[in-house]
Amino acid sequence: MTFSSVPMPPGTYTISKTFDFEGGHRLPGLPSEHKCSRQHGHSYEVEVILTAPRLEEPGFVTDFGALAPFKEFLAADLDHHNLHEILPFEPTSELLAQFLAGWFIQNVEPTIPGRLVAVGVRETRRSWARFEVEGQ
């Protein structure tokens, strides 16, 4: 078998990159008896998923290095902060994923060839939320 005989089917390319940060929060909108109404923290994992119909040279949806501004934002503005004190919404994983998608679209997407499809936020090994961007 020669490798040149393998067909390249049509389709869309998708990549993913995961970032992390440490953050604390509480959800003041919950009843005081709910454990998440009390201050607690997470080792957050944030996954960005990008897509493109064709690749940029040398064969990338987006160079992973071009996502550095997102990593820098997480480190400078969210890492080791009380999220309920700095964000203008209840810092649930769902709303945090939507907020991070908006920040990414505004600040990173204009500089890269790929388009954001979704942002996932993982609080624990078993608990996560995903925001899927419409109309991209």
Image (cartoon, rainbow, N blue to C red):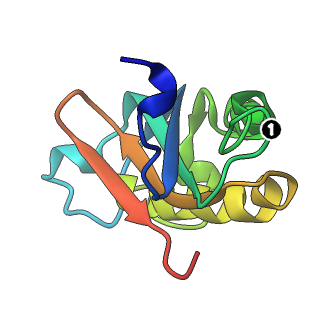
Q: Quadrant of the N terminus?
A: top left
Q: Nearer the viewer, residue 118 or 71?
A: 118
Location of residue 20 with respect to 69 vertically, above or below: above
Q: Position of residue 35 (x, y in %)?
A: 18, 43
- Nearer to us in this view, 62 or 18: 62
Residue occupied by mark 1: 57
Q: Is residue 10 visible?
A: yes
> Where's the C terminus, which quadrant?
bottom right
| Residue 48 visible to the viewer | no
Q: Which residue is rendered at x = 37% and y = 38% of the image?
A: 39
Amino acid on which disc 1 is placed: Glu
Residue closer to the observer: 63 or 82: 63
Q: For the residue labelled by badge 1, is the local secondary structure a helix, a strand or a loop?
A: loop
* Residue at x-position 60% and y-position 66%: 88
Q: Is residue 8 left or right of residue 101?
A: left
Local crowd size for mark 1, using a 10 Å CA cut-off: few (<14), some (14–19), many (≥20): few
Residue 58 point in image, percent of width and height = 77, 32
**Above or below: residue 10 compared with residue 132:** above
